[in-house]
Structures are given as C-alpha cells and as structure tokens.
Image (cartoon, rainbow, N blue to C red):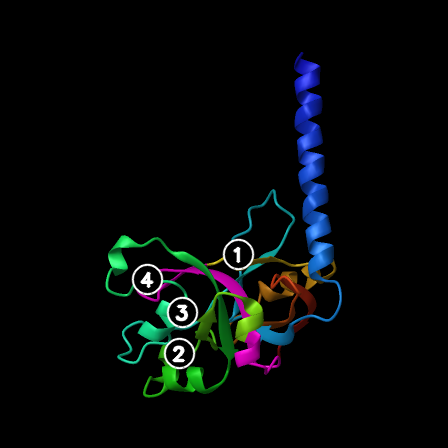
C-alpha cells in the first residue's frame, strides 16, 4: 500500500510538471506580446538560499497611491465590475494591468523628488487596467514601452499582487549574477523580458551594465 501511495504521488508530480511545461511552451509560441529590456530597478533579485541553485527576479513598479488623480479612477474601477460606493465590501478581482516603462507616468511620479529619493525606484508605472489583456492592448498598442500583466486589484484601485511577478532566470544567464554580487551603485544588470501570448513573462537575454 505504501509503495502504491508513493507511485500515485510521483505520478501527480510528473503530471503537474508536464502541465507546467506545456503551459510555458504554449505561452511562448508565436510572436511575444511584448519584448523590452528592464534593469535591476524593475527586476530585482529574489532571496536565494544556499541550497537552491535557481535564480529568480521579482518585478517591481512605482505608484503614488496618495495622488489626488489616481491611476485608475471610479470609471476604470466600475469597468472592472467594482461598485465604488462599497469599496470595503468587495473582494479583489483579477484584471490585466498595463505598465508603462520610463514614460510620462514615471516623469509624473518622479517630478519634484530629489535624485536620491528615486535613485533605486522602478521606472515601471501602472497606467490602465481592463478585464482582458486583448482589450488593454487595443488601448495601448505601443509594445516597446507598455507591458501587460495579470494582477489582482481591490475596489480602491490598489494592486494587491502581480500574479506573474516572480520570474525564473534561465541557467545560461546565472553566471552574470555571480559578478553582480561584487558590484554596488547604479543598476548592475539589464534583462530582456518577453511577455508571451498568455501574458506570462520570461527572460530571453541578460547583460551587465557599465
């Protein structure tokens, strides 16, 4: 009985891994929705323990929730299905968010701030949200500066989570990060990030910055 249980558990693990590989392959089929190069500010290294040989980065963004003209106003929240009269009585919803890189939203965010206050902050800023990625891409067709990712958003317009925010780095790029650990100062590396047809990001290139 114990052997049979182990076999079932192993089969479940194998099936789950196969499903994950199939999903990743489908996501990367065809032309990516977006390909852009982001720096360490936007894709910072996640904690790595000594027993784990993998390398992952975490996507980060900048947003001033105290802004009197919020990035996603009442009309945008209503379009996602929220009743803005009852923000505390509704669960967060799945939505797709458009993040603009190094554009007008970043200039607005950084305006009036001292250089040392924004030196390490992400230049990605959320600018819009919709129920589907296709709808959002129609509104923001610039694939060179706007990437679209699935998120959870609450009724007040807070992004609770970027659902694909943790991104594995392929082993062929791991050697770059050994050099990174001995450097300090400005962003130390840049990664080329592609977003597939299912809006799941993956790393396709890496380089050290001067």
Which element carries disc 4, helix, strand or loop? loop
User: Which is more toward the observer, 23 or 130?
Assistant: 130
141 sits left or right of 1 in the view: left
User: Which is more toward the observer, 11 or 184?
Assistant: 11
Residue holding disc 4 = 155
Cα distance, mark 1 to mark 3?
34 Å
Which element carries disc 2, helix, strand or loop? helix
Q: Nearer the viewer, mark 3 or mark 2?
A: 3
User: Which is more toward the observer, 36 or 113?
Assistant: 36
**Residue drawn at point x = 36 percent, y = 78 percent:** 117
Cα distance, mark 4 to mark 1?
29 Å
Q: Which residues are magenta?
A: 137-161
Give whichever of discs 4 and 3 has the lower sequence position: 3
Give whichever of discs 4 and 2 has the lower sequence position: 2
- Identify the image quadrant of residue 156: bottom left
Q: Nearer the viewer, mark 4 or mark 2?
A: 4
126 sits left or right of 166 in the view: left
Mark 3 closeness class: few <14, some 14–19, many ≥20 residues within 10 Å: few
Q: Is residue 147 magenta?
A: yes
Mark 1 closeness class: few <14, some 14–19, many ≥20 residues within 10 Å: some
Q: Looking at the rendered structure, which numbered label has been put on residue 118? A: 2
Give whichever of discs 1 and 2 has the lower sequence position: 1
How far across and down, in percent of the image, does residue 197 sit?
66, 65
Residue holding disc 1 = 46
Q: Are marks 4 and 1 in contact (CB under 8 Å)?
A: no
Q: Residue furthest top?
A: 1
Q: Is residue 69 magenta?
A: no
Q: Looking at the rendered structure, which numbered label has been put on residue 79? A: 3
């Amino acid at each position: 009985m114990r052997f049979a249980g182990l076999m079932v558990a192993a089969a479940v693990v194998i099936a789950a891994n196969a499903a994950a590989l199939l999903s990743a392959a489908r996501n990367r089929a065809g032309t990516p929705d977006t390909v852009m190069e982001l720096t360490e500010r936007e894709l910072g290294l996640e904690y790595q323990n000594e027993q784990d040989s993998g390398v992952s980065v975490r996507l980060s963004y900048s947003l001033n929730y105290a802004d009197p003209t919020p990035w996603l106003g009442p009309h945008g929240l209503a379009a996602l299905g929220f009743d803005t009269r009852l923000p505390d009585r509704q669960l967060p919803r799945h939505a797709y968010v458009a993040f603009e890189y190094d554009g007008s939203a970043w200039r607005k965010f950084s305006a009036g701030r001292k250089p040392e206050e924004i030196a390490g902050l992400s230049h990605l800023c959320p600018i819009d949200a919709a129920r589907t990625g296709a709808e959002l891409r129609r509104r923001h067709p610039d694939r060179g500066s706007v990437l679209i990712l699935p998120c959870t958003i609450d009724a007040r317009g807070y992004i609770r989570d970027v659902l694909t925010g943790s991104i594995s780095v392929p082993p062929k790029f791991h050697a770059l990060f050994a050099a990174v650990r001995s450097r300090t100062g400005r962003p130390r590396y840049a990664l080329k990030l592609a977003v597939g047809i299912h809006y799941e990001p993956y790393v396709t290139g890496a380089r050290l910055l001067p």
